[in-house]
Image (spheres, rainbow, N blue to C red):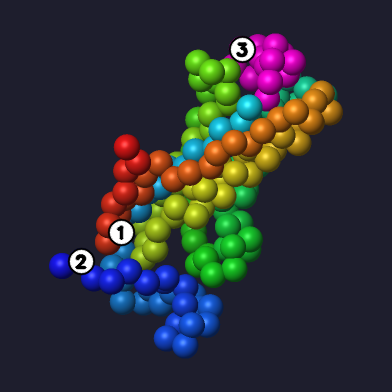
Amino acid sequence: MEPEKTFSHLDAAGNPAMVDVSAKSQTKRTAIAQSIVVLGDDIMQHLSNGDIQTKKGPVFQTAIIAGTMGAKKTSDLIPLCHPLGLESCKFQIQVNEANEVVIQCTASLTGKTGVEMEALTGASVAALTIYDMCKAFSHDIVIKETRLISKTGGKSDFIRK
């Protein structure tokens, strides 16, 4: 029988609390998150050599830098997240067959708590940066989905099917 699930960021009295990870073992933990940005044909026609060049610079390359910075600042943005020393934060940005920009952020470390919030934050900040860099051309941009793709190394692994 599976134990009853509870919200991890509430104490016994129902107040917000950071999860106590002191008794957990250090393990290699990795999370992959994805955001999808729909820029529209007007902007996508400027795609050349795998990136969009603007007066602000290369859009996807700038989004990778911003996403990495965002992942490193996750505990400053999400109140009950532990501050983590990421060992790796990598991005892939590709255009899919539907002409959508697909951002994947992979975050990893060896530690007592997972890195899914860092991967989700990294993918989200990269998507927001793409929006910011392209909005002068058109505001008809949609960040349509951010989701966890997988996480490994904690008490339970997750892989989206």
Dot 3: what SS? Answer: loop
Q: Which mark is residue 154?
A: 1
Give amino acid for label 2.
Answer: Glu
| Figure check: 88 above or below 10 | above
- Cα separation, mark 3 vs mark 1, equals 39 Å
**How far across and how far down the image is residue 147, in percent?**
48, 44
Give the quadrant of residue 144: top right
In the picture of the structure, the residue carrying the numbered disc 2 is 2
Residue placed most toward the observer, 85 or 48: 48
Residue wearing tag 3 = 49
Q: Give the number of the mark in front: 1 or 2.
A: 2
Amino acid type for the residue under numbered disc 3: Asn
Kind of element beneath mark 2: loop
* Image spot of residue 76 (x, y percent): 63, 63
Q: Earlier in the sequence, mark 1 or mark 2?
A: 2
Residue 10 location, x and y as percent?
Answer: 47, 77
Crowding at dot 3, Cα within 10 Å, few <14 / some 14-19 / many 20+, comes out as few
Q: Residue furthest left?
A: 1
